[in-house]
Image (cartoon, rainbow, N blue to C red):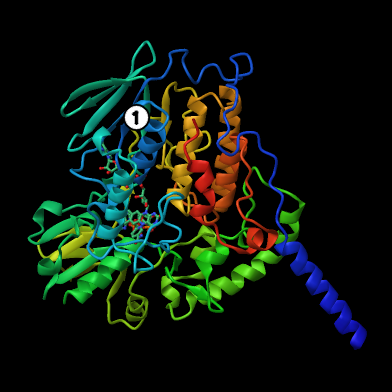
Amino acid sequence: MKRTLVILGCLSGGTYYILSNPLPRVEANGEPYQILPKVSESDHPNKHFLTRLPIKTVGIIGGGIAGCVMAKTLTQQGYQVEVIEKNPSFGGLWYKNYDGSGLQFHRDHYNLPDFPFVSKEDFPRSPEVAKYIESYAEKYSIKPYFQFKTSVNSIEQEKNDTWTVKTDKGDKNYDFLVLCTGPYNKPYIPKIKGFDRFKGKIIHSSEFINAENECKGKKVLVVGSGKSAFDILGQARNYGADVAVVMRKTHWLVPVDLKVFGYPLGHFNSSRLGGLFLDPYYSERSWVDSITGFFSPVYWYMIMWFIKKGVPNELMSEESYKKEKHFRGGARDKTIYKDIGNGKIPLHRGNIEEINSTGIRINGKDIPADLIVFATGFDREFFGLPAEEDGLWLYRNVLVPGKKNLAVIGIVNTYCNPLYTNMQAVWLAEVLRGQVCLPNEKKMHEDVNERKAYTRTILSGESTISFSWFPYPTIDQLLKDMGLSIIRKPNRLKYWFEPIKPEDYKEVVTHRK
Ligand SMILES: Cc1cc2nc3c(=O)[nH]c(=O)nc-3n(C[C@H](O)[C@H](O)[C@H](O)COP(=O)(O)OP(=O)(O)OC[C@H]3O[C@@H](n4cnc5c(N)ncnc54)[C@H](O)[C@@H]3O)c2cc1C
Ligand SMILES: NC(=O)c1ccc[n+]([C@@H]2O[C@H](COP(=O)([O-])OP(=O)(O)OC[C@H]3O[C@@H](n4cnc5c(N)ncnc54)[C@H](OP(=O)(O)O)[C@@H]3O)[C@@H](O)[C@H]2O)c1
């Protein structure tokens, strides 16, 4: 017994010693703040991406969080930057979002490495998120580069490879163009017979703003089974509406603050240890994954149990989990699930057959409504770039293979997207400085195809462009390209157990001359 205790003591002491000892950084050339020799033209395998024109002017379309980090990164490197934004102010999507909306991730995950999000709320609401973005713009003095209330209608590449941007206030021309127009900027409402006959009001979820008067004492019908639908149901009910919901499929919706044995799931899943229980990223497969892959079904079975707790079966069937294998954010007001389950909130499953003067017709039944809210998601539009049904497939989620002097930042994002967006912006700046060796176009396509196949296998194929549960691999990939260490934690204990923290990446976003 004594011997066993001694052995156990030695083992745990040794493990603790190893885990808490400083972790050696992977040797990296360009870190921190070091000026690297430029990659010479002959070293550069992709001569086709950048023209030989020196890039001076950069146009950025979209002034959300992505446009802001891009503008900050490039102005600090001396480029002449102009940001074209159709809204009258900062915030992007958060400038005007639906009533009651706010972060679905803890603010610790929705902040930038060099600008912490200070708030009393764990999940701040839209106006506070917009204010955070505006304060960032103020701190980094990028306001003067913004042209607000200007809409871009189209973009066109000139013979000399510069880009002409056609706006409602005239044309502009830039050496380089960055699209930061966000993943969700074109509301989608399905075309259904009888729209014009309806005597009430029809809106998209993004127009559900200052909705108290429209809801009070009214019949509000919400269409959709995504996060917007559940949130709007809750908010309309808070405003005294008589609510009902129409759904086709159901999805797995994870409560924003879900805890597993008292520990927030989002924290565990964004640690490297948590990542071992997920499908390994296409570029990262190793023998460790085979071992953890063996245990991962058990882990996910347990997580599913916690997610499903208290949610009626018809809202989260095992089939939908098996099909999607990944989750969407859940409703802010969790009583919504229970009340759909116990029939307090009528649920109509199926496709709407038609809209008539007093409501909708579904499954042969007429359902009355005063207000119909289509929480039916967003269309994706990328100024005519070659997108597929499940999105825009880009090299490193930034470059369009074969297109010169053009990049996309933020639109294709991941779980903790402000951090990833910021890493993309820094990566692009390094590409422009010639510090990242890009593969040739054929290799870019090969890489994109490999990631596409991986993503389509592990996700449902519906939500492939915007969602990746585990944030590290995509960020690691960009860091490695830039010759920077992926190790951002001081010791192994934190490396494996601590969730990703944007502030760990502060060094990466600090201006390099
Ligand atoms: C309801 C909702 C909630 C979300 N919650 C979260 C969350 O909790 N956590 C998270 O990580 N992500 C969340 N997301 C994802 C969200 O897209 C990102 O958080 C973030 O806003 C993306 O920033 P962005 O700058 O890339 O895009 P956006 O914030 O969408 O900014 C794009 C900007 O481009 C402008 N623009 C677009 N087209 C044009 C044009 N033609 N001309 C001029 N300007 C144009 C728009 O006006 C907008 O200001 C949520 C999305 C939605 C729809
Ligand atoms: N932070 C937050 O608080 C927050 C809030 C809202 C949204 N978001 C994010 O924003 C993104 C968009 O979310 P969203 O909820 O607006 O949209 P979404 O997740 O794309 O869901 C759209 C819903 O509309 C339904 N739909 C589409 N066409 C339909 C039709 N013809 N008839 C009936 N239903 C139809 C879909 O049904 P099917 O499933 O059957 O196709 C789906 O349930 C997501 O990434 C989400 O996570 C975040």
Q: Is residue 70 left or right of residue 320?
A: left
Q: Position of residue 498 (x, y in %)?
A: 59, 63
Asked whether residue 349 appears in the rendered view, the answer is yes
Q: Farthest residue to the left: give it.
A: 199
Q: Which is nearer the eye, 88 or 99?
A: 88
Camera-nearest residue between 290 and 262: 262
Find residue 142 and report its horizontal and vertical position in percent: 30, 38
Q: Residue at x 37, y 31 (%)?
A: 75
**Which class describes the residues within 10 Å of circle 1: few (<14), some (14-19), or many (20+)?**
few
Question: Picture quarter containing residue 293?
Answer: bottom right
Q: Is residue 119 above or below residue 379?
A: below
Mark 1 residue's CB less than 8 Å from ligand 1: no
Which amino acid lies under the numbered mark 1 shown in the image of this protein? Gly
Quarter of the image for residue 11 reads bottom right
Residue 121 in picture, x, y percent from top left:
34, 68
Which residue position is annotated with label 1? 384
Residue at figure coordinates x 48%, y 19% from the top left: 50
The one nearer the camera, 471 or 498, is: 498
Residue 463 visible? The answer is: no
Q: Is residue 458 above or below residue 404?
A: below
Q: Is residue 270 toward the left or the right of residue 419 in the image?
A: right
Residue 212: image quadrant is: bottom left
Q: Quadrant of the N terminus?
A: bottom right
Q: Residue furthest bottom?
A: 1
* Residue pictured at 42% horizontal, 62% vertical: 105
Q: At numbered mark 1, what does the secondary structure look like: helix, strand or loop?
A: loop
Q: Quadrant of ligand 2?
A: bottom left
